[in-house]
Amino acid sequence: MKLQHIIASASALAALMLASHTRAQVGQPYIHDPSTIAECDGKYYTFGTGGGGLISEDGWSWKGGAVRPGGGAAPDALKIGDRYLIIYGATGGGLGGGHNGRILTMWNKTLDPQSPDFQFTEPIEVCASDGLEDNDAIDPGLLLDPTTGRLWVSYGTYFGFIRLIEIDPKTGKRVEGNKEKDIAIDCEATDLLYRNGWYYLLGTHGTCCDGVNSTYNIVVGRSRQVTGPYIDNVGRDMLEGGGKMVVAAGDRKAGAGHFGRTVIDEGVEVMSFHWEADFDMGGRSVLAIRPLLWKNDWPVAGERFKEGTYEIESERRGYALELAVDFVRIPQDRQAWWRIKPEDPIVPVENQKLSDVIDTWPKEGIDVRIGDYMFRPHQRWTITAVPEAGGYLGGPYYKIVIEGTERALAATEQLEVTTVPTFSGAPEQLWRIEQLTDGTFRLLPKAIPGREGINTKYVLYSIGDSTPTLAEYDFHSDNSKWNFRNQ
């Protein structure tokens, strides 16, 4: 958070009413400098600058209500054992006109402010800056190293270096004798993560706090050691201003900052951050959640799934999900190739129309299968968000119907998939669509008939080249993975 870059603006922007798929999150997702999302008793929490934060029942619709005492700026949150550690900057970043900052930690048994166990411990100072040195003690990010159990904090702004310190994961205090280490410059609001033998330093580059004129973006370097050096994709050290782009402005949203990583399942990860300004929400600063992909061991921002009409293609063999109906040939006035003259006119062949075949389909339930994609109506699926059905971390539930109809894809009690003549909004007709870390997708019905609760286990699965079913998700099997082709 770089308050010294604030440029006051008195103009107001009118919000544009666009389709829901262009929004970051729904509800009141208004926040600045969000902490990494933490889950507590089935709810999601993120904290922001100034105290307080957001709560979500499902990870998609957010509202205010999270409580964090101490004010200050740019907190981070991490569950360690059965407690939650909160870290934040009390001053610095230009707050009050200076850079003499303090970073503090505190604990709580729960993040639910309505719980009888909700009580933060007294804050503990873990580092500070005097306003003159080449560092600003603000914007902390936490990493509990899964290989060693050691707890690290990166912090700092453009006012000098990004620094690394170690704190005790049992007490939240600075490790005795630990000396801070400079690891980057030319960024702020850093976060650390570990994956596949690499440590990653995510930094926020550019200017903040200027609404639609903010240039914030998130960059990354990596190292084999948590202490660095953090090198980008072309060999530049982040201590010399390096950094590979992870997420920049797009989709009428500007100013990506304050990265956080959440692992939902093996191969299913999301990144959280804020947009300094969402043009379609009046230029407000809002929470964003995007798929987190990995390419050659580099983090890449995925795209939230967008509504449309698609071929749903199995990663297993490349066949398309389709209705199990008779194949209807397209009439064509064919001419032997050796008799075609160069001057003969070319007449394009039209795609088969729904009206050409729908009367040949059964009126009630129709099973589904997988087959060669041939641009046929029984292979084209229109996917639309269902806002009233809620969502999950990073997306709403969707209905999946044959283009031009209400014939909907649905789960069955026998863990099979079929289609029903009309979409009713039943849970087994609602689908969770998540992009995996390799760029493919998994599809889960919201519920399985006859089973209680939200389904997080069974996915659309290609049990054979031509046979779709529902089965337990396995990231290491292409049977679990699908692609969406707009063709």
Image: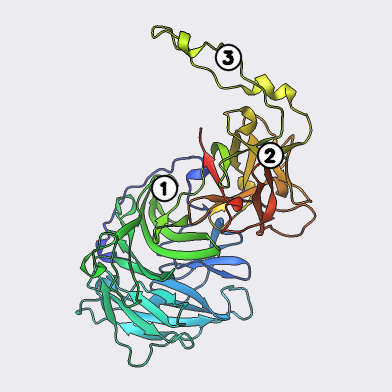
Where residue 290 appears, as percent x and y from the top left, is 47, 55
**For residue 210, above or below residue 166:** above
Q: What amino acid is labelled 2 in the image?
A: Arg
Separation of residues labelled 1 and 3 (CA atoms): 53 Å
Q: Categorize mark 3 by other alpha carbons within 10 Å: few (<14), some (14-19), many (20+).
A: few
Q: Earlier in the sequence, mark 1 or mark 3?
A: 1
Q: Which residue is mark 1?
A: 282
Residue 288 visible in the displayed image: no
Where residue 208 appears, as percent x and y from the top left, is 31, 59
Q: Earlier in the sequence, mark 2 or mark 3?
A: 3
Q: Categorize mark 2 by other alpha carbons within 10 Å: few (<14), some (14-19), many (20+).
A: many
Q: What amino acid is labelled 3 in the image?
A: Gln
View extreme (bottom): residue: 176
Query: Contact, CB < 8 Å: mark 1 with mark 3?
Result: no
Query: Residue drawn 48% across and 48% down?
Result: 23
Look at discs 1 and 3 and give the one toward the viewer: 3
Q: What amino acid is labelled 1 in the image?
A: Gly
Q: Which residue is mark 3?
A: 332
**For residue 328, above or below residue 433:** above
Where residue 113 appears, as percent x and y from the top left, is 58, 73
Query: Residue drawn 50% across and 65% down?
Result: 262
Q: Which residue is mark 2?
A: 369
Q: Categorize mark 1 by other alpha carbons within 10 Å: few (<14), some (14-19), many (20+).
A: some
Query: Contact, CB < 8 Å: mark 2 with mark 1?
Result: no
Query: Residue drawn 45% across and 82% down?
Result: 148
Task: Tell whether 93 sits left or right of 315.
Answer: left
What kind of element bears circle 3?
loop
Task: Tell whether 398 sits left or right of 17.
Answer: right
View extreme (front): residue: 338
Where residue 318 appears, as percent x and y from the top left, is 56, 41
Task: Classify the position of the N terminus by image quarter.
Answer: bottom left
Residue 261 visible in the displayed image: yes
